[in-house]
Amino acid sequence: MVENVRGELIRVLSAVEEKANELKMDGFEPDVVLFGREAYNFLSSLVKSELGGEELPTELSGLKIVILDELRGYAVVIDSKALGFALGAARRIRIVG
């Protein structure tokens, strides 16, 4: 069970970092990761299982976490300064589902 939790946490972290790096390679500066409620609850349970404590994650790989219920089981890494002005300023990730 512990190995599975750790593996899932590594999968989520790796996916977020991969999408952030893709944005950087395209000239963007990712600064926020939007999490759907289901995805955030999943991440929170992984963090609590792995690290213990009751503190909820507010940052992931240096990116501020913002919860957007409509995203459900997805997360979206964005450059908040370029979103809406430049195509490609966001990358979506399936976290759960």
Image (cartoon, rainbow, N blue to C red):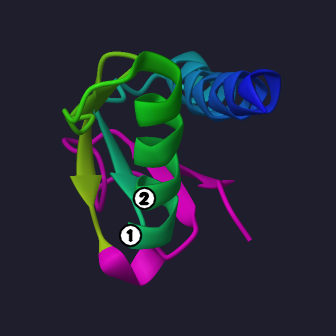
Above or below residue 42? Residue 3 is: above
Decide which of 63, 53 is in the foreground and name it: 53
Q: Position of residue 94 (x, y in %)?
A: 69, 58
Residue at (53% x, 37% y) in the render: 46
Q: Which residue is mark 2?
A: 41
Crowdedness near tag 1: few (<14), some (14–19) or many (≥20) residues, C-alpha within 10 Å: some
51 sits to left or right of 56: right
Above or below residue 12? Residue 35 is: below
Above or below residue 7? Residue 93 is: below
Decide which of 57, 84 is in the foreground and name it: 57
Residue at (41% x, 55% y) in the render: 40
Callout 1 amino acid: Arg
Q: Which residue is mark 1?
A: 37
Write down the region rendered in magenta: 69-97
Callout 2 amino acid: Asn
Decide which of 23, 50 is in the foreground and name it: 50
Residue 86: say if magenta: yes
Image quarter (top left, top right, bottom left or bottom right) of the C terminus? bottom right
Residue 85, numbered label: none
Q: Is residue 64 visible?
A: yes
